[in-house]
Amino acid sequence: MSESALLASPKAEGQDSRSKILAVALKLFTVKGYEGASIDEIRMGAGFKSKASLYTHFKSKDELSQALTSGILGQIEAVIIDGNDIAEPLMRFTMVIRGLIKWASLHPTECIFHMMQEQKKLVSEVEGKELSNTELMLLDIVQQLRAQYPVRPIATDALLSMIFVILAQTLLDGAAFGNISFDEKIEQIVSICFGVVFNEAVPVPKI
Amino acid sequence: MSESALLASPKAEGQDSRSKILAVALKLFTVKGYEGASIDEIRMGAGFKSKASLYTHFKSKDELSQALTSGILGQIEAVIIDGNDIAEPLMRFTMVIRGLIKWASLHPTECIFHMMQEQKKLVSEVEGKELSNTELMLLDIVQQLRAQYPVRPIATDALLSMIFVILAQTLLDGAAFGNISFDEKIEQIVSICFGVVFNEAVPVPKI
DNA sequence: CCTACCGATCGGTAGG
DNA sequence: CCTACCGATCGGTAGG
């Protein structure tokens, strides 16, 4: 096989490059932080000889980060929409929580990146007033829960950010859950989320 | 009052400079991240005209960050030691949790900085085997709790990191708790920690 | 997608 | 505690 065949795959080169860049950037941004990960490192990881190549796919470092964010929000939104056909608030909430845990297990880096970005927004007091679709839908779910169940007297968005932070932390502490099965792990995390959201003990409904 | 009197306090200038640097670095590291905050910004915030002055107090950027860390660990250790004279595991655990919440309320930036550092360690898989005194004491407290109460079948250090992450998140979401009193806020956070640590409902003991 | 380059800023230091 | 400076790297771009 010639060298050029190894360096360049025959079809859909453009799309591959773009997703390669995104994958490498996700990993590096998550591990080293936005400022800690340089464009040059990302360029290397994606297999380019020049930064200029990277800039044919993304206008700036910031745009690259935003592309990651919107992709992740889209994934989370899909999980939430999946629970839309369930009317009963507690069942719907449980379904979405389970869905988020499964998504996070399959996409740990995405989940951790997302949590770190949310923390960054809060700590710099940006107060980005505009709520994403994702946030609006989650707020609505917990709001409906509040009418019938003993949800804590704490702002709904604070409850939600605690859930995400716990989700991400279980991924960061991955090894700590190693001794129990995947299903048991999910049940434990769901149960923890219930402990965070409710003031009194509410049993987790069975599917 | 003259301008010089405002700019320079008469005594203990050296100590003041050091703590001024630490205070500014804590704030900037927390808000912008270690890589995002530059030595030159810290130097400006501390009121120096030159970076060289800063380097008379700290050998490197990393040493500055480590000085912050050890200071914070010392503060947390003091809180834990405060609960050492209580023998009953649940009472001791509750006392320490309350102490940590109060400390975090008085030192929010320190708490958030500490949590972010812990997350950074986990995400880069450093596996810093050496546990600090603080961690050892906390592990011991929860370990003793495990013998008599329904602590979750999850590694103790994972439970502890979840507690810290929730503590920090309540500070980041500060405004979300604005509508309830300080004492009620503490009780809610203690209750959330119980929900995280225990598998079944355990009432929070009264003092 | 590359070569070659830009000004700005980075952490850090020599010498006083 | 300062002036003045270091090499390295930063994000980004002109031109092909």
Image: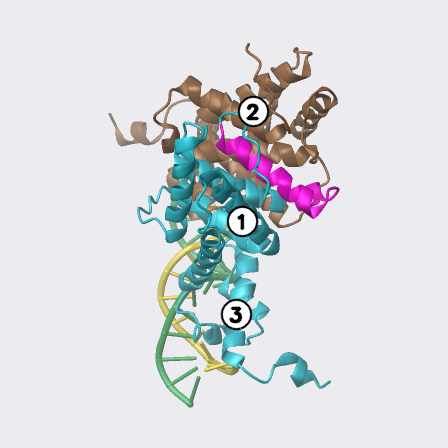
Chain colours: A brown, B cyan, C green, D yellow
Quarter of the image that includes the N terminus of chain B: bottom right
Q: Left or right: where does residue A5 sit relative to residue B178?
A: left
How many marks the image carries: the answer is 3
* Secondary structure found at label 2: helix
Circles 2 and 3 in contact, beta carbons < 8 Å: no
Q: Is residue B178 magenta?
A: yes
Kindly identify which residue carries mark 1. Answer: B100
**Residue type of the residue flagged with mark 1:** Leu
Q: CA distance from mark 2 to mark 3?
A: 45 Å
Residue A177 in percent (x, y) is at: 39, 28
Residue B161 in percent (x, y) is at: 46, 40
Instruction: Please determine whether, in this image, residue B149 is positioned above or below residue A53.
Output: above
Image point 61% across, 81% down: which residue?
B8
Q: Magenta region, mostly helix, strand or loop?
A: helix
Q: Nearer the viewer, residue C6 or A70?
A: A70
Q: Nearer the viewer, residue A140 or A5?
A: A140
Q: Quadrant of residue B167?
A: top right
Q: Residues within 10 Å of mark 1 (few under 14, many from 20)?
A: many
Q: CA distance from mark 2 to mark 1?
A: 36 Å
Kindly identify which residue carries mark 3. Answer: B19
Q: Left or right: where does residue B126 sit relative to residue B32?
A: left
Q: Is residue B118 magenta?
A: no
Tell me if residue A22 can be seen: no
Kindly identify which residue carries mark 2. Answer: A75
**Residue type of the residue flagged with mark 3:** Ser
Residue lying furthest left in this view?
A: A1
Residue A168 in percent (x, y) is at: 49, 34
Circles 3 and 1 in contact, beta carbons < 8 Å: no
Q: CA distance from mark 3 to mark 1?
A: 23 Å
Q: Which residues are magenta?
A: B173-198
